[in-house]
Image: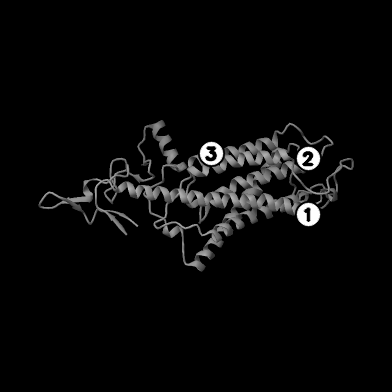
């Protein structure tokens, strides 16, 4: 432990806390980036080898289908552009710093990313197989779900599935417990919202309906089919998050290290949180006074200091020191600023 006894040294604690927040965001970024890459590369590798659209039955006999499944380049470009916006917003996510020094633990990072990416890959391949909705007696048709009229719409449905799955994965990648355990940052929340809405609108209002005899072009799908794909993605996202939690618990039991238990306790939500943004918005609209965080990420009531004698701007007030008989300032044992 390092005990800071001189006035103004609280800024060192702030610097360390900020650095640990940045490290948490970097780790979350790596997990998300690797999991998305696994989904895209593994999905296309398996589908190119194993999925043969020309074997699908019930399609228009005049439509020439390719021997292997693929998405147009424009679909991959759109996914990449929207995905990059979501990735950038991770730099402003709401995180809780660790009490102790951070470590990468790369095997765990890549293992968690593999679980997230593996579940997303399996769900994408399963949907592609189910979407052979023109075949008599297919599971998709038996459930009365919206039909795919042509191969162009099939590609669009898979595009939408992969896009939504990628953007939902960020909420599983940013926590080590369930995704509801910590509210996302404001920028991250709105970036994911814009990306998912944009992908859905693109899929529904694409200028072509796929009726042209061109198996390289995607075709717009119905709103009903887009809704079904959303439900499908949400169900697999919940499964993905549950498997992640179970896997991390198994890792914690094996290593004896639980990252969540080593997080610093904070009073309230960090200023980057979407909940903090809502409170500030309510305060501006209705003139209510709520809790706020400072630029350093500390949270305290508006009119009080915290129990360690720290002001909301990260400073140390006079309660952290006591005067002796000669007028010198000494550390107050009950109010000293402490860094672990």
Q: How many marks?
A: 3
Please state which of residues 72 and 180 is positioned toward the viewer in this rendering.
72
Of the image marks 3 and 2, the number of the one nearer the N terminus: 2
Mark carried by residue 152: 2
Of the image marks 1 and 2, the number of the one nearer the N terminus: 1
Q: Are marks 1 and 3 in contact (CB under 8 Å)?
A: no
Q: CA distance from mark 1 to mark 2?
A: 20 Å
Residue 331 relative to residue 74: left or right = left
Q: Secondary structure at mark 3?
A: helix
Identify the image's colour scheme: rainbow, by chain, secondary structure or one colour. one colour
Q: Position of residue 89 (x, y in %)?
A: 52, 41
Residue at the spot of label 3:
190
Residue at the spot of label 1:
49
Q: Residue at x 47, y 58 (%)?
A: 103
Front tag of 1 and 3: 1
Please state which of residues 291 and 315 is positioned toward the viewer in this rendering.
315
Q: CA distance from mark 1 to mark 3?
A: 37 Å
Residue 219 relative to residue 64: left or right = left
Give the quadrant of the N terminus. Answer: bottom left
Please state which of residues 289 and 70 is positioned toward the viewer in this rendering.
70
Q: Secondary structure at mark 1?
A: helix
Of the image marks 1 and 3, the number of the one nearer the N terminus: 1
Q: What is the crowding at mark 1: few (fewer than 14 residues within 10 Å), some, or many (at least 20)? A: few
Mark carried by residue 98: none
């Amino acid at each position: 432990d390092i005990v800071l006894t001189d006035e103004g040294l609280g800024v060192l604690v702030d610097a360390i806390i900020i650095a640990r927040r940045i490290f948490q965001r970097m780790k979350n970024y790596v997990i998300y980036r690797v999991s998305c890459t696994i989904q895209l590369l593994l999905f296309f590798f398996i589908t190119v080898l194993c999925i043969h659209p020309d074997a699908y039955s019930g399609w228009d006999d005049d439509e020439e289908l390719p021997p292997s499944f693929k998405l147009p380049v424009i679909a991959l470009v759109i996914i990449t552009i929207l995905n990059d916006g979501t990735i950038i917003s991770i730099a402003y996510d709401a995180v809780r710093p660790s009490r102790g020094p951070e470590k990468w633990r790369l095997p765990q990072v890549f293992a968690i990313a593999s679980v997230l990416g593996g579940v997303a890959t399996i769900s994408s391949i399963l949907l592609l197989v189910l979407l052979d909705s023109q075949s008599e007696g297919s599971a998709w048709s038996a459930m009365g779900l919206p039909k795919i009229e042509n191969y162009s719409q099939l590609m669009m449905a898979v595009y939408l599935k992969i896009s939504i799955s990628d953007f939902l994965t960020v909420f599983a990648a940013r926590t080590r417990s369930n995704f509801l355990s910590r509210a996302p940052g404001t920028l991250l929340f709105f970036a994911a919202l814009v990306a998912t809405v944009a992908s859905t609108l693109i899929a529904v209002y694409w200028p072509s309906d796929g009726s042209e005899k061109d198996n390289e072009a995607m075709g717009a799908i119905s709103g009903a089919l887009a809704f079904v794909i959303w439900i499908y993605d949400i169900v697999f996202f919940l499964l993905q998050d549950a498997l992640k939690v179970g896997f991390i618990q198994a890792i914690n039991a094996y290593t004896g290290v639980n990252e969540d238990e080593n997080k610093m306790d904070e009073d309230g939500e960090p200023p980057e949180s979407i909940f903090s943004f809502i409170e500030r918005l309510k305060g501006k609209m209705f003139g209510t006074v709520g809790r706020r965080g400072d630029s350093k990420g500390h949270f305290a009531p508006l009119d009080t200091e915290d129990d360690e004698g720290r002001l909301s701007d990260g400073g140390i007030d006079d309660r952290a020191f006591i005067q002796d008989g000669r007028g010198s300032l000494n550390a107050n044992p009950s109010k000293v600023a402490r860094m672990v």
